[in-house]
Image (cartoon, rainbow, N blue to C red):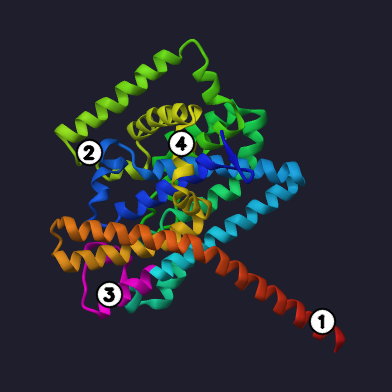
Amino acid sequence: MTTQSSRFIELDFLRGLVLLMIVVDHIGGSILSRFTLHTYALNDASEVFVFLGGYSAALAYAAIERRHTAAAAARRFVKRAWEIYLAFVITAMLMFATALLFSSLAIDAPNLAPIGLDLLFDAPLRTFNEVLTLHRQPYLASVLPMYVLFALAAPAMFRMASTRPLVLLATGVALWLGARRLGLYLPTAEESRWSFNPFAWQLMFVLGVLCKRQPVFQMLRHGRFAPHVSMAALAIVAGVALYKLVLDSSYPPGDLKFNLAFGRIANFLALAWFTGLAIERGWIAKLAQRLPAVCTIGKNGLIGFVTGAVISLALDALLYDLTGGLLHIPLGLAADALAIGMLLAAAKTLPGLLARGGALIRQSRAVLGKRRALN
């Protein structure tokens, strides 16, 4: 792969592309969402996002371990878990604030309902406590809690991926097979559940880790069964696309996403095979060089996700209010363009603002510390 500032440019590009898809996919009247992954496949951007999360986490862990120690890398991922948890809380509060704003403007849209604004008014302390303890996960914030768990488990995953990859894979598959039963033990509030079962979705994260730590793709690509793998992948991708476009565009039903149905995994792996071929030929790197804005979004994934959640919720509500829930191509395209522009602006400006804010806080603490020492 081509590197850029010690990063994989393809990774930044693909993650940025996925974040863009997630944003438009959550705008009900979006026109671009009619052409994103879920239209042609059983899976959607979620599988790609989690897989890339595992791949990039393994990349980061290896870099820290190489520069420092394995213990330092493990501590960094504990800190990362805390950062993701804070991002979840912030996203949840932003969901409540956005819903409150549109409620005050007498704007009502389907995606505002799952946030639970009525419950917040009826029992605010209980609702906030349920959010803080992960029992309640407002709409669009729900992917982050399982990432907290993945970050905490990541150091053990990375060690196993290097020394006992088959054991890690077998463990991931076993948890996935038992996910339906294990999911019953997840903390939940009344009339609320996790949108993603982490016991199932950890398998996508594990696959990402294994693909970084072991030459999985290279072994298959240069093995004697490579043509057969390509034919099987083509059959899956083409067959599913034909089925969805011609026979049933609504399949699969939503409940198959919670426990990560096998069909979603198979479809993702088939698409990943062709993506790997495109990376090998340098096509993704060329696209990334021509579309650096997408890479900018991908480099700041957590910021992109949080801001993207607010952008998609707000634009979905506005578009629904303007169109009455009916498809309107000009307004839908305008919403898409605005969403992409706002996400790009956030990715370009927020990291610098947050870095400067953090520097000011550290300087203030240092000054206070010196004053206390002098006194």
Q: Estimate the spatial distance between the alpha carbons at disc 4 and disc 1, rounded to whole Å.
A: 51 Å
SS class, disc 3: helix
Decide which of tag 3 and tag 2 comes sooner along the chain: 3
Query: Distance from label 1 to label 3 (Cα)?
Result: 47 Å
Tell me the distance, in whole angstroms, between the alpha carbons under discs 4 and 2: 29 Å
Nearest the viewer among 324 and 139 is 324
Q: Quadrant of the N terminus?
A: top right
Residue 148 seen: yes
Judged from the image, the secondary structure of the residue bearing numbered disc 2 is loop
Q: Quadrant of residue 267?
A: top left
The residue closer to the viewer here, 109 or 351, is 351
Tell me where residue 173 appears, x and y as whole percent: 48, 31
Q: Is residue 334 left or right of residue 282?
A: left
The quadrant of the image that shows the C terminus is bottom right
- Is residue 114 in the magenta section? yes
What SS does tag 4 mark? helix
Q: Nearer the viewer, mark 4 or mark 1?
A: 4
Q: Is residue 365 left or right of residue 132?
A: right
Q: Are marks 1 and 3 in contact (CB under 8 Å)?
A: no
The residue positioned 64% from the left and 57% from the top of the image is 79
| Residue beneath disc 2 | 251
Label 2 crowd bin: few (<14), some (14–19), many (20+), radius 10 Å: some
Disc 3/disc 2 C-alpha distance (Å): 32 Å
- Looking at the image, is mark 4 or mark 2 nearer the viewer? 4
* Residue holding disc 1: 370
Number of the front mark, 2 or 1: 1
Q: Earlier in the sequence, mark 4 or mark 2?
A: 2
Residue lying at 47% horizontally and 68% vertically, measured from the top left: 90
Q: Which residue is mark 4?
A: 284
Give the overall secondary structure of the magenta segment. helix
Give, as a three-letter code, the residue at label 1. Answer: Lys
The magenta-colored residue range is 95-117
